[in-house]
Amino acid sequence: MKMHKATRMFSLLLAGLMAVSLTSCGDDAGGNSSPGGSDSNSAGSSQQEESLYYNKEGYPICDDPITVTASGAEGRGVDWNELLVFQTIEDKLGIHIECNPYPADAWETQLTLMMTTNDLPDIICQGNISNADANQYGQEGYLLDMSQYLDLMPNFTARMDQDPALAAYLRDENGAIYGISKTRDSLCSRAVAMTYLNNNWLEAVGMEYPQTTEELYNVLKAFKEQDANENGDPNDEIPLSLTFDQYSGMRGEYVLRSAFGIYGYQSNYQLQTDDAGKVYLAEATDNWKEYVKYMNRLYEDGLLDQDSFIQTNEEYQAKILNNTTGMFSSWSTLTLIFNTQSAECYKDFDFFTGVSSDLTDETVYPLWNTVTAGTILNISADTQYPEALCRMVDYFYTEEGMILSTNGLEGVTFNYKEDAYGVKIFDKTGFWEDSGCESTIDWLYKSVILSSGGWEFVQYNPSQRVVDESTDEQLEEYIADADPVESANLVINAYKEAARRKVKSCDDYPNVVYTSEENDQRNKYFTAIQNYIQSTKAEFIIGTQDIDANWDTFLQTLDSMGLQELLAIEQAAYDRYAVNLK
Amino acid sequence: MKQKLKHLQGKDLIFVCINSFLLILIFCVTVYPLIFVISASVSDPAAVSTGEMVLLPVSPSLEAYQFVLSYQAIWTGYLNTIFYTFLGTLINLAATIPCAYALSRKDCPLKGLIMTLFMITMYFSGGLIPGYLNIVSMGLLNTRLVMLISGAVSAYNLIVARTFFANTIPWELHEAAFLDGCSDFRLLTRIVLPLSSPIIVVLILYYGVGHWNSYFNAMIYLQDRAKYPLQVFLREILTLGQFADTALATGDYSPEDMASLLRQVEKADMIKYAVIVVSTLPMMVIYPWLQKYFAKGVMIGSVKG
């Protein structure tokens, strides 16, 4: 691993040198081979004067199909050229894409090599380039600035207007857009701290759903002292089990923390802003101290699973499946229960929306950011067809494009079906069974769409949308009557959403983008500080370090590790973000 | 055994006891992972991940092998790897042996300088990007040839072979052959090589295992899946499991998809071990046959102070 890193650093250094030498060579030969965006722009405009190779509106985009190349990371060894989504792009949009994906772990090296040899494909799909890198490559002239073509991208523009966070995140300090990031559009997909409280246990100990941290403490204590799972053994109950900082069990922390005024989905480095827009680190506040003290109390009294810091995901799942935990946060395990036991059993679990404490007046549920960090699609600055490719990107912001990127084509990979509540379901029965794949999703990823969401720029899930838009009464109806087997997704989301609506919600700290200098500076401090917080948190909670006695030392150590410098960088990035947001 | 022990007395006995104990210990440490992997490959994955399976298989099934053997890409990879290993090793030998032999001879001009140049490559390489540019400019990108001829001579193996030739073939033998009118080529093929089987076996093994495990070059220089060696496909199977793992953590899937992903994670755990067995088996089978030459060759060829 170390070796790999060293090679990469070295190759990057060489990459820089090569880029310099390449451009200087170019100058000697008349300055026409620099990898800049200016070339393609002029090429584009000269073509425009003759006759347009593309249509400004409507589909296909190109009447005479154009051919472009695409590369990216493919984690499952699928040949993209055989995927329906690429064939449909050719049939429908008139753009033939020659794909050349690389195994996921080879991709990063390949990208560096392609850039140094000035041989980028037209489209980088599933390239996983961070926004900071994308901005840097873009400013160096490798990637296309899509903001130049926004007049050709009405759907994309509409999406940015609707979700200002997306625009603020994608634009660099000069307003340019060098890559596309995925967004979530439904509340269902943003309320994902996924912690559950066992209803049967609550009933068994005769207690109500808790509203405050103290009530929660008492509930957990009752779980421990009584035979809450009613198996005759009062001592096998684990009241609360989590997996700190890894696996899905880490999410329990996010909803518990919100009781102390810390709202977000970042572990051990949760930034927040005050009313004046000043960025601060939640872990260095008294609120966080109170949270850790609370967890320490749960741990010392045996209410928090003593294995919380060390258990593996398998051990965790086994505990939940054996009905030995009263409160847990493992979405995938719950799904397993839905599937293996009965879809009805979702009623056994309360979607836990948090509690309030002395520090907070009301219960607040944290919401995940709409924007996912990192870019999933970039266009090379050297492409001959920037307009057509931008229009192609725009296509995937239409309803039709969203369906194509997630489910394929009607009549080819699915038929529409309506469930009992008139919700559109993509019924794939009859299309995949003969493929030799063992499940629908397996087949989808092998022959229809990209597995890492290559074209799915907006998370598309009609049943989530229905839940989002429904009234409280409708939600109750879904929960009460809908057939869980027929539309499990709807029911589970309705259940979650109904619980969420009873409390207030708060947005996570936004994803922000750093300039390349900021990024270099930030890397110096960030990992060390995060690791320090993680290990100290564990010691505080387990009690090997007394938090009251060591709190000042903790804060001093953070400062000596460069927290103030780091926060200055965060503040600068946030200020830029806030400006872009307006 | 008993009789032998009777002859031993006092300190010797203690020595034999401790020695045997240590050897048995080392034997166990070496053998345990092998047995574990084989057992795990036929066990229920849940039992493996919870640590229920310690040594012997738990609820055995051949499902993992069924999957691995029906995975078309594995066979493509297998054939490619055999091809690269066989032909690549031949090329390695054809390039290394004459070179090592020439450098081992006293009458080779500029011996020191050439050796120094070779040694430099052991410590400094041109780096990834110049190497890549070099391959591109030679038109070797995405060809099978790149897997065969890049790195045809390893300086380390060259030194081992050179030392062997210099130390085991007496110079007097050369003189005698020359007196009888033997040419340099004839000398190499008729006299030196027949005396050098241990070092040839060592070279075959070193180069062969290198080709068998080679994966980075393929990853960088090959684009066409039909040309990938086995190791690239194996990594792909392993990362399949990781993919499902990360997908599960995001929780964005419908219950049915989630269940399917969970099954995949389980399966990937099981396949992992089957894949290890399948890919190492040929080497494990071949090694015992070469082992006796191997020990000898490495000892003789090693660089002596």
Image: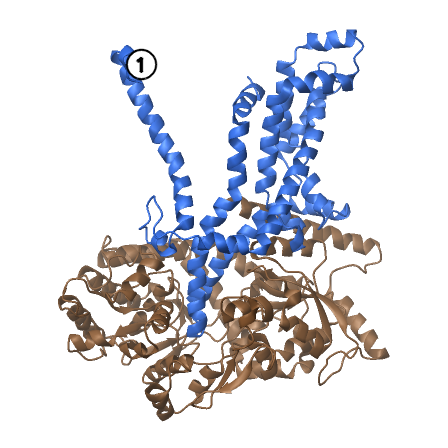
Q: Position of residue B269 (x, y in %)?
A: 43, 54
Helix, strand or loop under label 1: helix
Residue A507: quadrant of the picture:
bottom left
Q: Which residue is mark 1?
A: B4
Q: Is residue B69 left or right of residue A217?
A: right
Between B149 and A485, the residue placed more toward the observer is A485
Q: Does residue A172 show up?
A: no
Q: Could you say which is closer to the camera, residue B150 or residue A216?
A: B150
In x, y percent, where is residue A72?
62, 62
- Which image quadrant is residue A159 in? bottom right
Q: Is residue A380 above or below residue A53?
A: above
**Chain seen in brown:** A
The relative height of residue A379 versus residue B122 in the rendered view (above or below) is: below
Q: Residue at x 40, y 48 (%)?
A: B40
Crowd tier of the residue under label 1, counting other residues whose Cα lies within 10 Å: few below 14, some 14–19, many 20 or above: few
Instruction: Tell me which chain appears blue.
Output: B
